[in-house]
Image: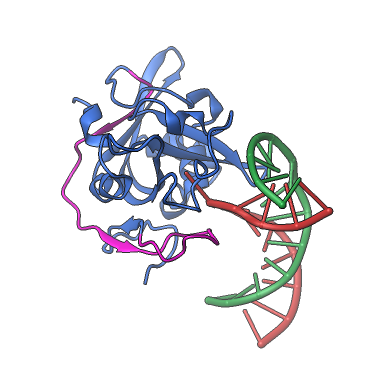
Chain colours: A blue, B green, C red
Amino acid sequence: MDCIYPTFYQRPTDQVAEDLIGKLLVRRIKENGHTRRLSGIIVEAEAYGHADDAASHAHRGQTKRNSVMFGQVGMAYVYFTYGNHFCLNVSARSTSDVAGAVLIRSIEPVEGIDIMKKHRHAEDVHSLTSGPGKLTQALEIDLGQNGVDMTDPASELCIEPGVKRQAIATQRIGITRAVDKKWRFVDPSSSFLSRKFR
DNA sequence: CGCTCGATATTCT
DNA sequence: GAATATCGAGCGA
C-alpha cells in the first residue's frame, strides 16, 4: 500500500488535520530479525500554524527542537514534553507559509495490538493509543524517528489512505493561547479519543 | 467519578 | 525560575 503523497501536506494545516481523520498511521519495527507492522486509524488530530498561531511551537521562530516544522512537508516531528512523554506530528503547511505541523492525538489500534500491549505494559485496548503520549509509547516512537519521511513507503513511519470517517472541529487541548481556534478534529463516533469534545 | 501532584526536557522570561 | 501540544498514581466523595 502506498503512502499519502507530499502534496496532501502542502495545504493549510487545519485542512490537513481534518483530512487525516480516518487515515492509517503505520509503524514498522524490527522484532527478532523480521519486520512487524503496527498500525491504527487516526481519530483525533490537531493543527498547529506559525505566525497566525500563538499556541504553536513554531510561533516564536525556529529552534533546534522545532526545526522539522520549518523543513519539507510530510516529515515526522517528534518532541519530548513534560519531562516524560513524546508526541508525534507530521509537518505540513500551505505553500505560502514557512512552518506548521499536525499533532496526531489518538488512533484506533488495527495491526500489532499484541506488541502495543507489551510496549504500554497494559492489557486494556482502549488505553493503548488514546492520547498523544500513549500512542508514541505503543508504537515505540521517540526522538529517533524525528525527521523521518512519512511519505516514503519504505520508511519506519508512514500514513496510508485508510477509511472514510466523519470529522468535526473543536477546541484544541492543553493549550492556553489561541484557544478560540477550532483546530482539533475528531471522529465523534470513536471510543478511542483522548478526551470528550464539545 | 473528579481532583491534586510528580515526573523533569526544552524553551522562554 | 516558570510554563508547557501529558499521563497515571493516589486520594476522597
Residue extending farthest to the left is: A164
Which residue occupies the foreground of this view, A28 or A51? Answer: A51
Q: Residue at x 38, y 51 (%)?
A: A46
Name the quadrant containing residue A171.
Answer: bottom left
Query: Can you give x and y, in whole percent of width and height, for residue B11 in the image?
Result: 63, 39
Is the residue A179 above or below the residue A82 in the image?
A: below
- Count up the numbered dots: 0
Q: Give the side of residue A88 with respect to residue A112, left or right.
A: right
Q: Give the side of residue A140 with respect to residue A19, left or right.
A: right
Q: Give the side of residue A96 with respect to residue C2, left or right.
A: left
Which residue occupies the foreground of this view, A49 or A142? Answer: A49
Is the residue A57 above or below the residue A38 in the image?
A: below
Q: Is residue A60 visible?
A: yes
Residue extending farthest to the top is: A33
- State the predominant SS element of the stretch in magenta: loop
Q: Residue at x 49, y 41 (%)?
A: A58
Query: Can you give x and y, in whole percent of width and height, for residue A28 in the image?
Result: 37, 24
Is the residue B3 above or below the residue A153 in the image?
A: below
Residues in magenta, as a range:
A155-182
Query: Can you give x and y, in whole percent of width and height, for residue A20 in the image?
Result: 27, 45
Query: Can you give x and y, in whole percent of width and height, for residue A43 in the image?
Result: 31, 52
Q: Is A156 part of what is drawn in magenta?
A: yes
Q: Residue at x 33, y 27 (%)?
A: A150
Name the quadrant containing residue A10.
Answer: top left
Q: Is A67 part of what is drawn in magenta?
A: no
Q: Quadrant of the N terminus of chain A?
A: top left
Q: Is residue A4 visible?
A: no
Q: Give the side of residue A13 with respect to residue A33, left or right.
A: left
